[in-house]
Amino acid sequence: METNNPIRHEVLTWDDVDKLIDVLLPQLRTVGVIEAMVMITRGGVIPGGLLAEALGIRHLLTAAVDFPSTEMAGLMAWPSFLQFPDASLLVNRKTLIVDDVWGSGRTITAVRGRVESAGATPFTCVMHFNPYRSLFSKAEPDFYGAVTDAFIVYPWELDRGVKGIPLGVEIN
């Protein structure tokens, strides 16, 4: 399916990422001490590490989620947790869930539900929130660095190119 409006790409530098972290830190400090972090692989690992260092969070965990990409399941597919921390590591902890982007919102929402069911107090955090792609009309991340409608390319992703566009080609 071709569209007349190609997806806009935004390629970030490390300075751009630093600025987003600077936007997020004061927001995150409003909830007090965060006792644990669940980083969603792969996108949340680098932002999570940067935030953990800045906030002094030492209890770092990861979650890997897969949604079947069958045409029959479509967007209603149930998530498969490939990796998730044991509930005993989350119970009674104020827990920050970190990913790079809230696009559809399916992944971070699934992780939030599982963190909450483990007995933690969850807060969601992303670098970029795309409300135009979100499947949840009344849900959004608790904390986000910026709102966008673009496909974001982070500096740690540059070696893979941009959706078939070779590196070195200027993107608007």
Image: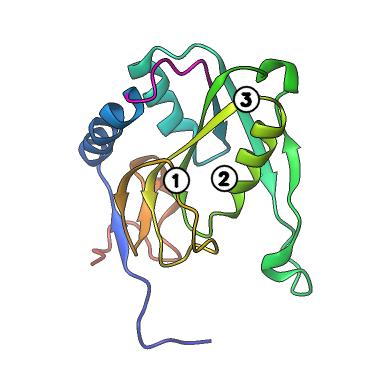
- Residue at which label 1 appears: 141
The secondary structure type at the circle numbered 1 is: loop
Q: Amino acid at mark 2?
A: Ile
Q: Amino acid at mark 1?
A: Pro
Label 2 and label 1: CA atoms lie apart by 9 Å
Magenta range: 30-36
Q: Quadrant of residue 100?
A: top left
Residue 126: percent from left, percent from top: 42, 42
Q: How many marks?
A: 3
Write the residue at 42% across / 20% down: 52
Label 1 and label 3: CA atoms lie apart by 17 Å
Question: Would residue 111 appear left or right of 100 to someone viewing this image?
Answer: right
Question: Would residue 158 appear left or right of 69 to someone viewing this image?
Answer: left
Residue 113: percent from left, percent from top: 66, 41
The quadrant in which the C terminus is found is bottom left
Q: Amino acid at mark 3?
A: Ala
> How dense is the environment of label 3, judged by Cα within 10 Å: few (below 14), some, or many (20 and up)?
many
- Residue at which label 2 appears: 108
34 falls in the magenta region: yes
Q: Main secondary structure of the magenta part?
A: loop
Q: Nearer the viewer, mark 3 or mark 2?
A: 3
Q: Earlier in the sequence, mark 2 or mark 1?
A: 2
Residue 117: percent from left, percent from top: 71, 33
> How dense is the environment of label 1, judged by Cα within 10 Å: few (below 14), some, or many (20 and up)?
many
> Compared with residue 167, is residue 23 higher up or lower down, i.e. above or below?
above
